């Protein structure tokens, strides 16, 4: 009888202890926010920088005279391929997110046509070759039907730091160049700056 009572007391004590652990630890809080909300926690390059800079740069690019000059010369909208944007900073920057933002901004403008990146084109070619080998004649995709780009959009992201004590200034410079594929001429050079003050 005594032994059973001791066991019961022990079980109740353990249950109460386990029950009170989460309340004592506090736990993590997660808030779902609008993706367009500007949030800067660390001061490093983030999604807000990517969206803002890509929008500004494509706006610059498409307001330049090269678009109308090409239309007047060729009688159609120019075709653009977004190539590599190199991260030349000492921070980890997901450049693929930035190039995707550039691609969307170009596509949504309606002023140019956009073709797949080189990596995407390679995947498409492999799929096409597989379909040509295994599909029926009437559904088989044709080869040599790709649209060649008239221009390549390429660039780099650089950063410069200025630190004093617990305060830091981060200066980002994003440079893009639109290259004529036929002549390698620079049809448009663009640059956008981004500056942040980080205080600890």
Image (tube, rainbow, N blue to C red):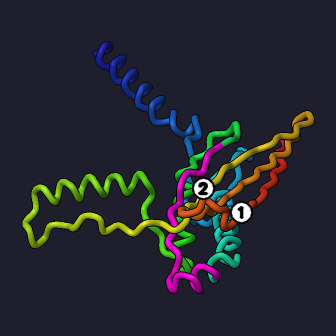
Vertical arrangement, residue 96 with respect to residue 88, above or below: below
Q: Secondary structure at mark 2?
A: strand
Vertical arrangement, residue 157 with respect to residue 113, above or below: above
* Visible residue check, residue 33: no
Q: Is residue 23 magenta?
A: no
Q: Which residue is mark 2?
A: 154
Q: Position of residue 46 (x, y in %)?
A: 65, 52
Vertical arrangement, residue 21 with respect to residue 29, above or below: above
What residue span does the magenta drawing correspond to? Answer: 69-87
Residue 118 marker:
none
Q: Which image quadrant for residue 189?
A: bottom right
Q: Residue at x 78, y 57 (%)?
A: 193
Q: Is residue 81 magenta?
A: yes
Q: Which residue is mark 1?
A: 189
Q: Secondary structure at mark 1?
A: strand
Question: In the rendered view of the protein, which quadrant contains the N terminus?
Answer: top left
Characterize the local packing of mark 1: few (<14), some (14-19) or many (20 or more) Cα atoms within 10 angstroms.
some
* Visible residue check, residue 144: yes
Whole-number angstrom distance, CA of label 2 to CA of label 1? 10 Å
Q: Residue at x 65, y 75 (%)?
A: 66
Q: Going by the image, does 102 lie left or right of 130?
A: right
Q: Position of residue 43 (x, y in %)?
A: 74, 47
Q: Going by the image, does 8 lie left or right of 193?
A: left
Question: Which is more N-terminal, label 1 or label 2?
Answer: 2
Q: Position of residue 137 (x, y in %)?
A: 8, 68
């Amino acid at each position: 009888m005594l032994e059973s009572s001791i066991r019961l007391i022990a079980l109740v004590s353990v249950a109460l202890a386990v029950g009170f652990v989460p309340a004592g630890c506090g736990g993590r809080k997660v808030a779902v926010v609008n993706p367009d909300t500007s949030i800067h926690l660390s001061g490093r390059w983030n999604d807000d920088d990517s969206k803002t800079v890509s929008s500004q740069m494509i706006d610059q690019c498409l307001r330049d005279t090269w678009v109308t000059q090409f239309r007047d010369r060729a009688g159609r909208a120019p075709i653009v391929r977004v190539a590599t944007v190199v991260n030349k900073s000492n921070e980890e920057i997901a450049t693929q997110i930035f190039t995707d933002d550039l691609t969307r901004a170009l596509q949504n403008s309606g002023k140019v046509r956009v073709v797949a990146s080189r990596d995407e084109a390679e995947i498409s070619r492999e799929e096409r070759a597989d379909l040509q080998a295994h599909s029926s004649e009437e559904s088989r995709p044709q080869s040599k039907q790709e649209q060649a780009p008239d221009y390549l959009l390429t660039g780099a992201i650089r950063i410069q730091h200025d630190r004093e004590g617990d305060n830091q200034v981060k200066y980002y410079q994003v440079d893009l160049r639109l290259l004529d594929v036929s002549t390698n001429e620079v049809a448009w050079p663009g640059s956008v700056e981004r500056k942040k003050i980080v205080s600890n």
